[in-house]
Image: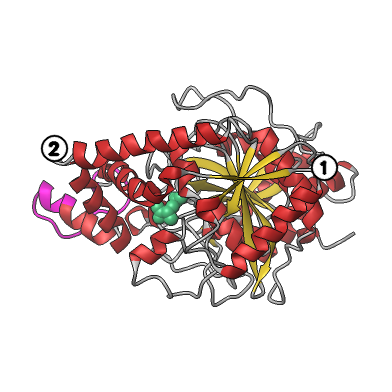
Amino acid sequence: MAELTDLTAEEAIAAIGAGEVSSVELTEAHLARAESDTWHSFLEVDRERALAAARRIDAAPERPPLAGVPVGIKDALSTKDLTTTSGSKILEGFRPVYTATCVARLEAAGAVVLGKTNMDEFAMGSSCENSAYGPTRNPWDLDRVPGGSSGGSASSVSARQVPWSLGSDTGGSIRQPAALCGIVGMKPTYGAVSRYGLIAFASSLDQVGPFARTVRDSALLLQHMVGHDPMDSTSIDLPEPIALPSRERLDGLRVGVIEELMGEGVDAGVRATVETALAAMESLGATLHPVHIPHAKYALATYYLIAPAECSANLARFDGIRYGHRTADAHDLLETYERTRSEGFGPEVKRRIMLGTFALASGYYDAYYGQAQRVRTLMVRDFDDIFSEVDVVASPTSPSVAFPLGERTADPYTMYLSDICTIPMSLAGLPAMSIPCGLSDGLPVGLQLAGPALSENRLFEAAHATELALGFDTRPGGTA
Ligand code: GLN
């Protein structure tokens, strides 16, 4: 048998089912890699907790569906008994009193949580460099970023520290790091996965989703997370269960190629690689159609009003009284708030809180937040029009391949442009995923596929057939 850490989750479940390996052995093999600090994917690895879970599963009379396969969890997800910081100093050492619904569901289905993965502070960023605990490195090139904000979750899967992991995506934070690390990342329809226990960034956009090395693994992980949760009133039941994709052809599938995301601002190497992938879809029987998002040019501005506005409200709870860090140096309540927040938050989080507070101020509310919400509706309509003509849309996931550490930290606007291709789907609440589709300059390029709300199964089928045709090797070239 191959190295245990090379197995996909599906292969690992089969190996456990056939009695070739135990959950404890599988967990031990992944722990050994997860404890390596080469990539700094993890903020915390809890060996004892993971092995105890694996032993329980091995001893149980019946095997749960996920059979004791290890998983990595983004540190934005609350986990009882495991430190949860959301990448922020303000939550250093914080232990939640409950576990996020999606994580609890995975544990109930037999997933073994290895630990918590690194991320940009409160999920604000595109490179993992905004973590208060130092950046994560891209397994394809240790001097480059893994993408963000779920950079640790992406690198942990790419570096084979876990076969799969959870991230959260507000404007691209699953899809963009998946693209930069050469793996599969999926953001479900808004509401498909409960947000209960996800530390909120922008509540009308945040969604939890899977990272994996195959499309089928990502469907399998999602299968065990979705569905209504009484603790999140925005969560919904899907019209049908998530199925594992199996089709190898795409006959009759109408693929809309988003013209606005194939031109200016997208690196030539990325565009050429995506075009090759689109040709592969065509050779499987799909038809390609140029489509337009007329309001795409406002997507970034709209997102950077809505997301900071919602974050300024959500982050008001970090006041030094209820959770985490409290300043040692205050004489009254107001000073406690001010000093705690100025010591605890990093520069990007402060920038967003200030932007959001400004956009929500009573005199400006309608001109900024109200206007952004109206443009958001126009973008939803753009997609409604598109999906009256095609079944899925395609574009690059990221306009560039992984960039060098430090390259964009001094220039927030350039950093914000990293999500130019992923934000439109977030604003419209659509399911969208990134699959690796080739290399440019030796670094992975992601193909983004998106569909109408609740079209998860269609999307997985399209992505699976394309993945088979492309045959991308997810092993990081030379460094793993
Ligand atoms: N990079 C975007 C931002 O900084 C998206 C982040 C995310 O999806 N959480 O807001």
- The image quadrant that residue 206 belongs to is top left
Q: Is residue 228 magenta?
A: no
Residue type at the position of mark 2: Ser
Helix, strand or loop status at disc 2: loop
Q: Which of 249/246 is in front? A: 249
Residue type at the position of mark 1: Arg
Q: Is mark 1 within 8 Å of ligand 1?
A: no
Residue under the point 55% across and 58% down: 177
**Which mark, by number, is residue 351?**
none
Pinpoint residue 103: horizontal percent, then vertical percent: 57, 39
Does residue 93 appear anywhere in the picture?
no
247 horizontally vs 331: left or right: right
Q: Main secondary structure of the magenta part?
A: loop
279 horizontally vs 157: left or right: right
- The image quadrant that residue 276 belongs to is bottom right
Q: Report which residue position mark 1 lands on.
A: 249
Q: Report which residue position mark 2 lands on.
A: 362
Compared with residue 69, is residue 254 higher up or lower down, i.e. above or below? Answer: above
Q: Which of 344/51 is in front? A: 344
Please identify the quadrant where the C terminus is shown. Answer: bottom right
Compared with residue 135, is residue 7 higher up or lower down, i.e. above or below? Answer: above
Residue under the point 28% across and 58% down: 344
Pinpoint residue 147: horizontal percent, then vertical percent: 52, 62
Q: Is residue 325 magenta?
A: yes
Pinpoint residue 138: horizontal percent, then vertical percent: 58, 69
Q: Earlier in the sequence, mark 2 or mark 1?
A: 1
Circle count: 2
Q: Which stretch did the figure color magenta?
A: 319-337
Helix, strand or loop status at disc 1: loop
Q: CA distance from mark 2 to mark 1?
A: 54 Å
